[in-house]
Each structure stands twice: as structure tokens, then as C-alpha cells.
Amino acid sequence: MGQAVSRVLVLAAIIISAGYLLQLDDSAPRVQAPAAPAGVQVSPSLLTQSDSSGREYFVSRREVVPTGVTAIRLPILMYHYVRTPPSMRTDMLGYRLSVSPEVFQQQMDWLYNHGYHPVNFNQVRAYFAGNDGLPSRPVVITLDDGYRDLYTAAYPILRAHGFTAVAYIVPGFVGWPQYITRDQLLEMDRSGIEIASHTMSHANLAKMSWGSTMYELVESRRWLEGLVGHPVIDFAYPSGQFTRQTVAAVQSAGYDTAVTELESIVHSRADRYTWSRTRVGGGELMPEFIANLGSSMPSVTIRNLDVKNLEPPPVTPSRPEA
């Protein structure tokens, strides 16, 4: 009886201490933290305590955007090249589509240090289905076309921050000079980058027949799914061009979402075939990048107490005396 009361008192003390620590954490100023090394995940445990009963207690905290909202504020950032931008005088389009690796690094650092959490469209689907809340300050990072610098420049920076992203791939370009290879695509997929479709040949679907449009959509999806071995159901309209027929074709081809180049950060499940994005291009200064993120959705704090039984140390059999 005395031992049971003692264990209850220990558990109560742990919970009270955890609540105090969490309050301190809430009121403390946010300190700039270095990016986590590639492949390392920071433990959510805020307190670990064990007692004489052989149990260990873990108190964790998770901030989430609760489900139940039909329209969400979610910036979907749109990148193309992550490279040294070409000259504005000789290649204005290339300049507008390019962000230098240094600027991309600064932008990812800012998101990391200010508590933003990149998500992919599988997480957005789970949110709208009511299965799970989004992490606080969610953002989607998308990279179009599958240029080689997606793998050589953007991907290492994303991994260093522990960030996911959505890569819209044109299968007809895979393996070409200046584009990613099959092996690089597979590596990114296995490392948590969502692979999505961008047609078979980057065709302007708004100017194509129904049959040609369906070929571009179905063949791209078939090729990507055959490579990665799982469904590919998210799509981006090349150059943002689409019509009512294009949207109907995307639905018929089995995709679940499609993004445009329209500007907005508000999205709903109902308009998922014309989701807008926020362009990030050459010459953009950090204040503009920050302003384009808009205001974040309110989040709530979920606290959990997990109790685990410690395994007893192995017993070494004693040798019989000679």
C-alpha cells in the first residue's frame, strides 16, 4: 500500500514538474537553433524520469493546427531553379525562375528558426480528412521540372534542415543533361521528398486535345509510379496553364490535387484542382519572402505523458564451483 502511494506521488510530481518546464518553454524567447544534421530527428521528449518501480516517464509537447477548418491558410512556395541566376539582360525568364543556393539557404534558415514546418500533400490530405492536425506554421515547398540542381543544390539544404518538399517531375526529361537521373529521383523519394507529376513532356495542356492531354497525364503518372513503387496523385500544370477541360482530365487521370501559378495562400478541399502558389524567384529580398508567407493559422498545444517499463538487466548465470 505504501509503495503504491509512493509511486502515485512520484508520478504526480513528474507531471507538475513537466507542466512547470512547459510553461517556462512557452515564455522563453526563441533562440536561433542550428539546422539538425541530415537524417537526425530531434526527440520530442521534454522530461525523462524513472522511479524505483522500473518505469520511465516521457513528457512531450506538440503544437498542431486542429482539424475541422474547411479553408486553411497554407503558403505553397513555388521554386524552379536553385542556381546562380543568369543575367537579367540576356535571360530574363531564367533570372525570374532562379534562386541562388545562398538565398535558398537563407530562406530555409529563416523558416527553420521561426518555427515553420514544411509538409507535403499527403499531410494536407490527412488534415482535410480529419485524420490528423497540421503542425504549427505549416508551409509546402514545391520545386518544378526536376532540374539537376534540385538534387545537387536544393535537396542537401532541405535534408540539412529536416525539411520535406514536393518535387514536380517531367519523366520525359529524366536522365537528360541538366536534369535529375532515375537514381537521384529514387534517393529523394526514399528520403521523404514527395514525388509528383508535371506531365510527360512539360506540354501546355490548355492547348491540347482531350486525347493528348490524357496521354500526358496518365503516362507521366504511370512512369513515376513504376519507378517509386507507390501512388503518385499530385500534379502541377506546366507554366500554370489550364482550362475546364484540363481540370476534368486531371480528375479523370486519377490525381487528387493540382497546383497552378495563381497567387493566394487560402485553400480548401473543394478547390484542390486549382490550388494557388507563391512564386519565389530571382531578385526577391527577404522582407518580401517573409511577407508572402502571410499570417499563420492558430495552433493548439498537445501534451502527452508516456510511461514505459524499463527492461531488467540481463542475469549472468554463475559458474559452478570446481
Image (cartoon, rainbow, N blue to C red):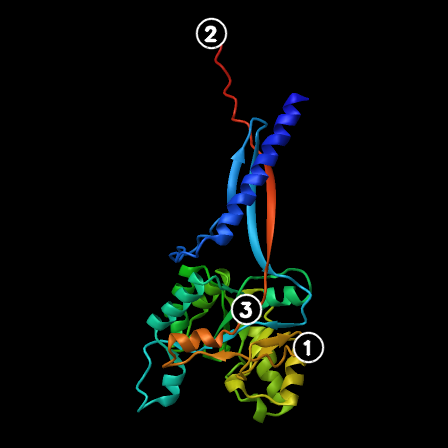
What is the CA distance from the residue labelled 1 to the residue labelled 3?
21 Å
Q: Nearer the viewer, residue 64 or 87?
A: 64
The residue lying at 37 percent from left, 77 percent from top is: 285
Q: Quadrant of the N terminus?
A: top right
> Which residue is the site of mark 1?
270
First in residue order: circle 1 vs circle 3: 1
Q: Secondary structure at mark 3?
A: loop
The first of marks 3 and 2 along the sequence is 3
Residue 278: horizontal and vertical position, in percent? 50, 79
Secondary structure of the residue carrying tag 2 is loop
Nearer the viewer's eye, disc 1 or disc 3?
3
Q: Amino acid at mark 2?
A: Glu
**Which residue is rendered at x = 49% and y = 64% of the image?**
116
**Callout 3, which amino acid?**
Ser
Q: Residues within 10 Å of mark 2 (few under 14, many from 20)?
A: few
Query: How many numbered discs sit on the rendered protein?
Result: 3
Whole-percent x, y for residue 221 in the image: 58, 75
Residue 262 position by quadrant: bottom right
31 to 276, vertically: above or below? above
SS state under label 1: loop
Give the residue at mark 3.
296
